Amino acid sequence: MRCSICYIDDRIPAIDEAVNKIIDNTKKLDETILKLLLTSVNEENWDEKEVRDLITLLLGKEDILLSAFTNPSFYFNHNQSEIYRPEIFILDWDYNGDTNDTEDYLKQLLDYSFCFIAIYTRYDKLHEIEAILEKPEFLDNKNRIVIWHKEDSDSVDKLIANIMQLREENFSFKFGHELRKNAIDATERILLDLGASTSNDISKYFQITDDSNKDLIDFISERFKSYLASSKLKVLDEKEIDEVKIPEHTLDELAGKLWSHRLYYYPSETDQLFRKGDIFIKDGIYHLVISADCDLAKFWHKNFGSLNCIKLYPFDEKDVIKEKLLLTRKADIKSKLFQFSLISDVNSLTQGPFILPFLRVKTDGQILLKDFFAFPKDTISFSIPAPDTGGDKTKLSKLSLKYGHLENSVKLASLTEPFLTQTVEHILNVLRGFGVPDYPKSVVELLHNKTKQIFE
């Protein structure tokens, strides 16, 4: 499978006027165009010999699919009309002598898709680039960036070798192409399923309103998950599993990041609807929403303005958590606090306290993973005034609850399935208090002795 590489450098030369009428230098330059450049432009007319050498070497590799742009902005413009996700970007640092734009472009590329970026530059820019990569916004993605120097005689060979090594060792790099292909196939199958329906049909069947298209999204996500699961993506064979070695110092960090993405959905800033399983912060206090989605969709009609939540206690509020845990218990419970799944009983604790781990929270410009204790009986209800609808009760009865309706509230994340439904059910079951009276100690011991006789 060929490795897709996009080279962005404004030193890729313009060619003569006659050919320029056919080739637009602001568009994507595919392999055919790049080969034409190599044959049509004399070597002495290339501003930088290293640029020509790099393109020549990459085009000579059968396992590399090369495209190029002369400016990062042209790449982003291209993606407005055609999806193009290369595995690797080779990025020149200077564009018309301005490095401020390049820093912004680098951040956009890292945020836009999973890729590795090789910054291909001269030694005089090394300290400037290293200082930029130490900024908080780049720290999480620092392992996806390498710097190569154009002056090094073997820089191109080293760059190619590094690319091939990354392709073998990194999971997302190694399986990204197959996973993207399977995701596109799954999307096409969903479109085929819906192909006979009109927009009016979809609106009617899935109860789409101005505020919410959740029914349709739920349908698409379930179908997508089903189709993707049937794609038989082969991740690791037994030999590879034996060979995988994870450094001890990165194991905890890696586990946190992976489980953070498995447990939670992190919405865009435009998603302002309240949903069951939302985790939000208001006036410095964290909350988990337990109100049902159908009630939140017609909030003032069904919930009469009341939003039901439980409070979450971050682990750094350890004095508050410790006071609750030790209220009627001995201090030695700390050796028994194990949790084997999200809603399994924390050993030695009754009434369903549980831990919500690895929530991604932005603090002082940095993304941190925070852990929380949740006590199902520590409920809180917000009474939210109805917005002004000019006396239109029908309009009010159909309004969904949004974060703008609850002052100073900020949405952080939402629990995902299969954790969402079971977690909320766990909380509600604890609140219902289903149970029967405990046996007295004498009966417990009697039954215990009878049970032991089975094994004698």
Image (cartoon, rainbow, N blue to C red):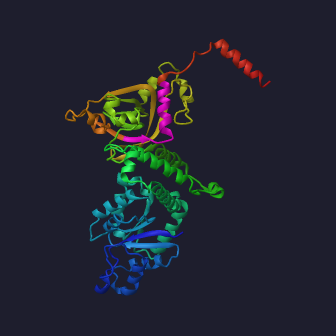
Please name the residue shown 41% across and 45% down the image. Answer: 205
Q: Nearer the viewer, residue 183 or 196?
A: 196
Residue drawn at (51%, 24%) of the image:
351
Residue located 32% across and 38% down the image = 400
Q: Quadrant of residue 119?
A: bottom left
Relative to 255, say whether 76 is above or below. Answer: below
* Residue span colored magenta: 412-430
Q: Position of residue 219 (x, y in %)?
A: 46, 47
- Please tell me which residue lies in front, 229 or 317: 229
**Image quadrant in which the C terminus is located:** top right
- Front residue of this view, candidates 425 and 317: 425
Q: Does residue 289 show up?
A: yes
At 67% from the left edge and 13% from the top edge, which residue is drawn?
A: 443
Q: Is residue 187 left or right of residue 436?
A: left
Report whether residue 266 is seen: no
Quarter of the picture holding the N terminus: bottom right
Query: Can you give x and y, in whole percent of width and height, for residue 247 in the image?
Result: 55, 51
Q: Is residue 229 above or below residue 8?
A: above
Give 203 or 44, whichever is nearer the viewer.
Answer: 203
Q: Indicate left or right for 365 with 450 as reference.
A: left
On whether residue 429 falls in the magenta region, the answer is yes
In this view, the residue farthest toward the left is: 390
